[in-house]
Image (tube, helix red, strand yellow):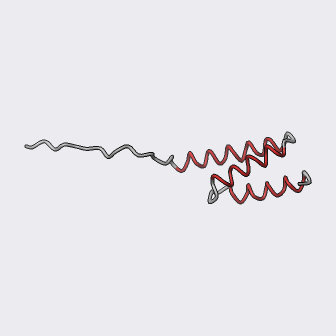
Amino acid sequence: MPLVEQTTPPSQPVAPPPMSRLVEQNDLFSAAMEAERHGHHAAALHKLDDLITRFPEGPLTESARGERQRIRSASGE
């Protein structure tokens, strides 16, 4: 019986599983809300902007946009 040589494809970057991307989005959103609760509006806006930029089609993007608008209005920006 002839031996069959197995080859492995060259290493390529592998996208993280979708769940870990959702965890990243949750972490950013939570950190933004925590910053806002402590009165750190600029930091909250920065984190929300980061979430919106990095995950434009993510499930939390619309919520991030809404929170961003609310924080800007509340802080007089």
Hey, which residue is sitting farthest top in the picture? 38
Residue lying at 56% horizontally and 45% vertically, measured from the top left: 20
Q: Which image quadrant is residue 6 in? A: top left
In the rendered structure, the answer to whether residue 12 lies left or right of residue 33 reads left
**Along the viewing direction, whichever of 56 and 19 lies nearer the viewer:** 56
Total numbered circles: 0
**Along the viewing direction, whichever of 4 and 45 lies nearer the viewer:** 45
Q: Which image quadrant is residue 69 in? A: bottom right
Specify the quadrant that holds the C terminus: bottom right
Q: Position of residue 5 (x, y in %)?
A: 19, 43
Q: Position of residue 64 (x, y in %)?
A: 73, 55
Q: Relative to 60, is 30 above or below? A: above
**Along the viewing direction, whichever of 55 and 37 lies nearer the viewer:** 55
Q: Position of residue 33 (x, y in %)?
A: 78, 45
Residue lying at 66% horizontally and 54% vertically, measured from the top left: 53
In the rendered structure, the answer to whether residue 51 lies left or right of residue 9 reads right
In the rendered structure, the answer to whether residue 58 lies left or right of residue 43 reads left
Hey, which residue is sitting farthest right in the picture? 76
Q: Position of residue 40 (x, y in %)?
A: 84, 41
Specify the quadrant that holds the N terminus: top left
Residue lying at 71% horizontally and 47% vertically, measured from the top left: 29
